[in-house]
Amino acid sequence: MKSKPETSENGETPDALVIDDLTVAYNGKPAIWDVDLRIPEGVLTAIVGPNGAGKSTLIKAALQLIPRAAGTVRFFGLPYEKARSFVGYVPQRGSVDWDFPTSVIDVVTMGLYGQLGWIRRPGGKEHEIAMYALEQVGLEDFANRQISQLSGGQQQRTFLARALVQDAQIYFMDEPFAAVDAVTERAIIAIMRELRDRGKTVLVVHHDLQTIEEYFDWVTLLNVEVVASGPVETTFTSEKLRQTYGGRVSYLYEDKVKKTAEAG
Amino acid sequence: MFEIEGLFIKFLLNFFSNLEINTFLRSPQNTATIIGGLIAISGALLGTFLLLRGMSLTSDAISHTVLLGIVVAFMVLTQLLGQEPDLSSPWLIIGAAAAGVATVVLTEAIYRSGLVKQDAALGLAFPLMFAIAVILVSRFVQDVHMDEDAVMIGEIGVAWADTNSHCLENCEAVTITPDSPEAEFSRQCTNCRELGIGPRDEGAVFSEQCSNCGEYSPAQAWQAGLLETEPLLIFWPKSITVMTLITLLTLAFVLVFFKELKLSTFDPALAAALGFRPGVLHYALMVTISLVAVGAFEAVGSILVIAFFIIPPAAAYILTDNLSRMLVISSLIGAAGAYFGYDLARGSVLGLFQVDAVLRGLNRAFDLKLAETWNSSISASMVLMMFLFFFAAWVLSPKYGLLSTWLRRQNQEKNFDIQVILAHIFNHEGTDKEREELAVGTLYHHFRWPASTTRRMIDQLLSNDLIYIKDGIVRLTSDGKERVEVFRETQLARETVIQ
């Protein structure tokens, strides 16, 4: 069974995620630029920024799904090739074809393929683990459903269950709250909190500025470059938000400004 | 190849006599059905993944561009190495596979430039490679046996005739030299052609020439009557060997890497994140597809190959929600299409009736003077038969077929109307406005339905014991109440709330 390295050479616990000088470009145009980022272990982090800020790109580059122009990424002090077994990934729901001929339990079991390695097939033990994860997200009755019969929220919970079976130390979730209803959103955040309470690190690409303070304890403000990153109380300020979103003031942002103004 | 054929034959000889095997394979039908079936099975297995990846047309592109690989490999072998390869030569197959991969690489390179969409990139890459192949064939490979017919529809019908002869017993190769007792001699003019004169002309020089000298393989020796005991011979169609090997390879690839193929087809990003190298799998899939395309090229040409890749999986996709079952069903549909396709080419439709009889009937009825014997392209008939199976699945599939969808909708609409009435009664029963809302005579007003329709439904509800009428007011029976509650639970359910 995998376990993350407890200590680095100098005896300190390394940060869960350390990104240095990471740059990714599409056709010569930088999508993210010279990103330096440190996320400590055991926090629930929101990655926030306007459209085109490079939030998904940051995750994909960290997991080597797209080529990096420069920079290094380390998970608990290790490069991705060696950290794979304790990194969990939840892609955007729209990134797969939900008409694919497969069942909910089958999709969840896919999260275990990494542990199985090449060629070995999942068996009874894997089925049990997947069922347990489905119970955690409240989809146990849907195990044998064809995935095209799921609602958007159920699809998202299926993806979440698939990440849970990976039993990772650090999770990357790309817009898990996109187009889900309030009930599902509460359910997802409850599971994320539980993960955090078990010492896992969770990074979430998030859009709703109003819920940041309620849901997360760490925030990274991104707009191609990192504007700020740190605990929500000290980092999620109206000034930093203005820097991140520039002139494009959304009503959410105005709300936030108003709230901080009232509080101050 | 020859050695592998030997292994197949030794295996089969455990069960059948050489005579049985030869008789079986000498039938054009058996050989064509075997080859067609093998192409259909391997095509269906790989086509399933192509279909699910949204890459169906890639099989069409590859089936064309393998021609370039075949031609280039042919030229290298003949011009540079002085060999005389045929289509079952492994080098031609390797060349074809390389061309198939090159098609995909070229398409992706054009697409990645960001200036051309994916389908257009495919449309740019493969005609280019096919055009080069056509020019090379017509300019440099004059004597190669490759006519338009072969490229169009293939030669599956004559595959039985192109055989390797295998000798297993009494294998006496005979060499006749001028000193042998069997040698036959004839007098021939040695300088006639040179001088342009006839044998009777003056100056013609004659010498004794051996007319049957040379080396005889056991099969040739037996035919020429040079052997006393008949050698044990098997005549094995070359195409069967190639296609069997390709099918076994395809089957092994899909079985061994089933999990990896499934994951990288469904969610390539997760596959990459978990370290499964979807790119490598992608190219492995393309190489296997190229192999099947080149194996199929000789038999069914390059145009119809796509049908063997796409029609069976498309039918299976409608019939099942499970990937493993989809692979099995599409293979079965492909194989059945090949089997009944041969029959169709020879005029029999699924063994149910003869096309000849239909043509005769038409002639008699309308005096059309149609030719009454039906004999058509085998590969095209196989495709037609597969499409027939697809059509059946499309219309009749229990879950997604057009017919069942239509029936379900009809049923739902009818049910829905009944539920509307029941729900209306449920909502107003026992309220102050009961008399106004639930009076039998005016109930139809509330739905804006014709009075007669409403009356008919009420009669139906009464006879099903779901409602009863008291004092001119409709009321729900306990069965009726239950029906409403079940409907609310199943149809008005919100997403399951989780704790």
Image: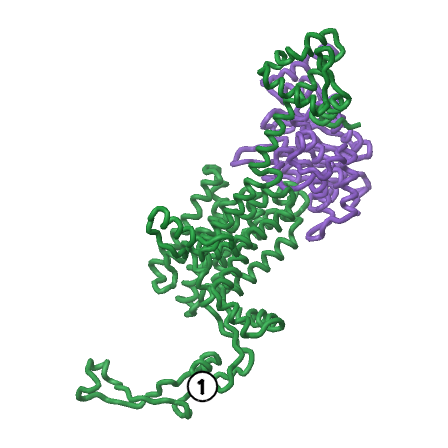
Chain colours: A purple, B green
Residue B60 is left or right of residue A203, and the answer is left
Residue drawn 46% across and 37% down?
B115
Residue B11 visible, this angle: yes
Image quarter (top left, top right, bottom left or bottom right) of the C terminus of chain A? top right
Q: Nearer the viewer, residue A98 or B449?
A: B449
Pinpoint residue B483: horizontal percent, then vertical percent.
73, 24
Image quarter of residue B461: top right
Pinpoint residue A245: horizontal percent, then vertical percent.
62, 21
The answer to whether B350 is drawn above or below residue A107 in the figure is below
Pinpoint residue B31: horizontal percent, then vertical percent.
50, 63
Residue B482 is left or right of residue B210, and the answer is right
Q: Residue furthest left?
A: B202
Residue bearing mark 1: B226
Element under label 1? loop
Residue A215 visible, this angle: no
Residue drawn 73% across and 44% down?
A112
Q: Badge 1 sits on which subunit?
A: B
Tell me if mark 1 has few (under 14), some (14-19) or many (20+) residues whose alpha carbon lies within 10 angstroms of its own. some
Q: Amino acid at mark 1?
A: Leu
The answer to whether A190 is drawn above or below residue B76 in the figure is above
Residue drawn 48% across and 53% down?
B353
